[in-house]
Image (spheres, rainbow, N blue to C red):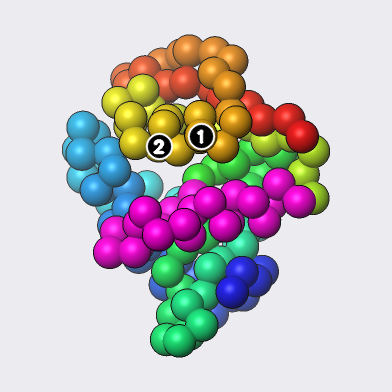
Amino acid sequence: MIREFKENDLDSIMQIWVDTNMQAHNFIPKEYWINNYDMVKNMLPQAEVYVYEDDETNQIVGFIGLEDNYIAGIFVRNEVQSKGIGKQLLDYVKCFKPCLNLSVYEKNARAIRFYQREKFMVQSKSVDENTNEKELGMSWRR
């Protein structure tokens, strides 16, 4: 089930955020994610966030965070990745967003393949000033 974020979801989604970032971005030191944890935890409640809650366990297993039409990220617990949860979260927001943009690290080939399958096109290349890693700017239009 996909629903809007509630304040008491914060600890669960932050655990998913940190675990998923460390796993998906093993080319960035873990300290980077740990050092940014509190900032993200303070910013998340102001963002547009939708969570995927497992119907059987009532546990949050994924979420998508948006700022207007910008996808700040799609995060799914490592143990349930590749089961369609990320696609369901993305399809959910595609229903009411006419266009979407995002940035993805060039070394995150799995994420790039996912977004390309979902009809996102590479629009730009840049370097993330915080990590010195190359990023792709991608966009989708209905």
Helix, strand or loop at disc 1?
helix
Kind of residue sitting beneath label 1 = Arg
Vertical order, 100 against 8 (above or below): above
- Place residue 104 in its image quadrant: top left
Kind of residue sitting beneath label 2 = Ala
Helix, strand or loop at disc 2?
helix
Q: Is-magenta flag for residue 88?
A: yes
Q: For this view, does 142 lie left or right of residue 138?
A: right
Residue drawn at the location 73% of the way across and 30% of the way down: 141
Q: Where residue 35 sits: x, y (%)?
A: 31, 47
Residue drawn at the location 58% of the way across and 56% of the way down: 89
**Residue that mark 1 sits on:** 117
Residue 66 seen anywhere in this rendered image of the structure: yes
Number of other residues with Cα within 10 Å of mark 1, as a class: few under 14, some 14 to 19, many 20 or more: few
In depth, the one of 102 and 35 nearer the eye is 102
Residue drawn at the location 42% of the way across and 86% of the way down: 57
**Residue that mark 2 sits on:** 111
Magenta stretch, residue numbers? 74-95
Quarter holding the C terminus is top right
Vertical order, 1 against 57 (above or below): above
Vertical order, 128 against 67 (above or below): above
